[in-house]
Amino acid sequence: MANSTVTFFPVGEKNGGMTLIKLNDANKTTILIDCSIGDEAIADHCDVNQELRDRLPVDSNGRPYVDAFILTHRHEDHLKGFQRHFNTGSLDDYKDDEDELKIVIREMWSSQNFWKPSSENYKLCDNAKAFNKEIKRRVELYSKDKSIQSEGDRVIIVGKDPEGRTDGLEEINYDIGDTFCKINNINIPSKLNGFILSPIEQQEDEDGKCFTDKNRQSIVIQLNVSQGTKNNKLLIAADAECLVWETLWEKHKDDTEKLEYDILYAPHHCSWHSLSYDSLSKDDDPQVCEDAKKALSQANEGACIVAQCRIIKGSDEDPPSEAAKDEYIDIVGEDQFYCTNEHPDEEKPEPIEFNLTGMGPQKRGIKEKAMLSVAALSSTKESYQHG
């Protein structure tokens, strides 16, 4: 593989998120961020399950796998299809006689709130419960002998548990502000470096209900994927909303490098509420929060923004929001904004893929249905100055 790649998959009618990063290191490391695999093809055209599986490696036993699965937060649209398509439990019990083999997760990443049980005020979908059960199984294995487990049992926790349950788990725990260059217990600093931006700590005037909200607890990471001397910067924004971005600007406005990107995942499926505290439908003159927009405006020259969401229309439905789309276009230009379910058109959406090259991300051509490999298209990109 000449270049590392990142693929954004179309999502269902209720939005969603699923992104695959394939590195061109010696191990051909694969990282899946969230999953959104429905039972039906998107727009009766794109079979997301097959599109994902076509891109995954298989191990010596013929099992499809990812080296790391990073769950940004526990909403159903970021875990759709988890129980059906991903293996849980010990690999010793893996069922290799099924018509469609389940995907092995060598290392699972989760925020620390997997310990928080489902309740009337914190409802978890069945996929989230299954994910939490698997995370707990892996943490318990580590806790028994304080050693990194075998592939299929590995785990990384993001953030410190306020009740102290991450104490003693430092080897498998990243805190906010930490950097990392290890995936599946393998150091690859020449290829990958990451910086943990969020979930940020509880703010002074923030109530507990807001702080524990699933979107509020989203994992936000800046990933740097190297090719030669170029760092391709991916800002994984999850469903983080306005308070998070406003706070991140306050924290990093004197060192904006941590917020820079070549590709931004438009937060919360291009929601207005990642850019504003105001309501588009209830407020007479809703205003953008300038600090939140500044945090999301640290675009490198030629950067693009990808919204993983249903078709963006001028309606009251949010997300996605056409008003938010307009703000992102203001940052990178219309030609550099992409919606997964509108690419290349609304009737036949296809995954959006980028080669991460020594000259920055280059969008790939549309994949022929019978082929996975395509030639990269060169593009002339517009310059944007930092906000």
Image (tube, rainbow, N blue to C red):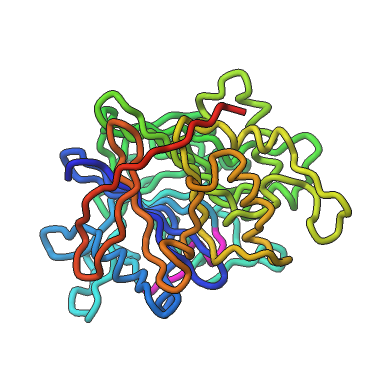
Asked if 240 appears above or below 313 in the picture, the reply is above
Residue occupying the point 58% across, 45% down: 329
Does residue 351 appear anywhere in the picture?
A: yes
Q: Residue at x 35, y 40 (%)?
A: 361
Residue 383 position within the rendered picture, expressed as x and y whole percent measured from the top left? 49, 31
Judged left or right of residue 21, residue 139 is right
Closer to the camera in the image, 58 or 303? 303
In the image, what residue occupies the spot 77% across and 42% down? Answer: 206
Give the quarter of the image for residue 289: top right
- Farthest top residue? 254
Q: Is residue 168 visible?
A: no
Q: Is residue 371 above or below residue 47?
A: above
Residue 202: x and y in percent read 70, 39
Q: Is residue 208 magenta?
A: no
Q: Position of residue 73 (x, y in %)?
A: 54, 54
Q: In the rendered structure, which segment of residues is drawn in magenta? A: 74-84
The residue sitting at the front extreme is 380
The residue lying at 44 percent from left, 57 percent from top is 34
Work out which quarter of the rendered image holds the C terminus and state it: top right
Q: Is residue 173 above or below residue 377?
A: above
Q: Is residue 79 magenta?
A: yes
Q: Quadrant of the N terminus?
A: top left
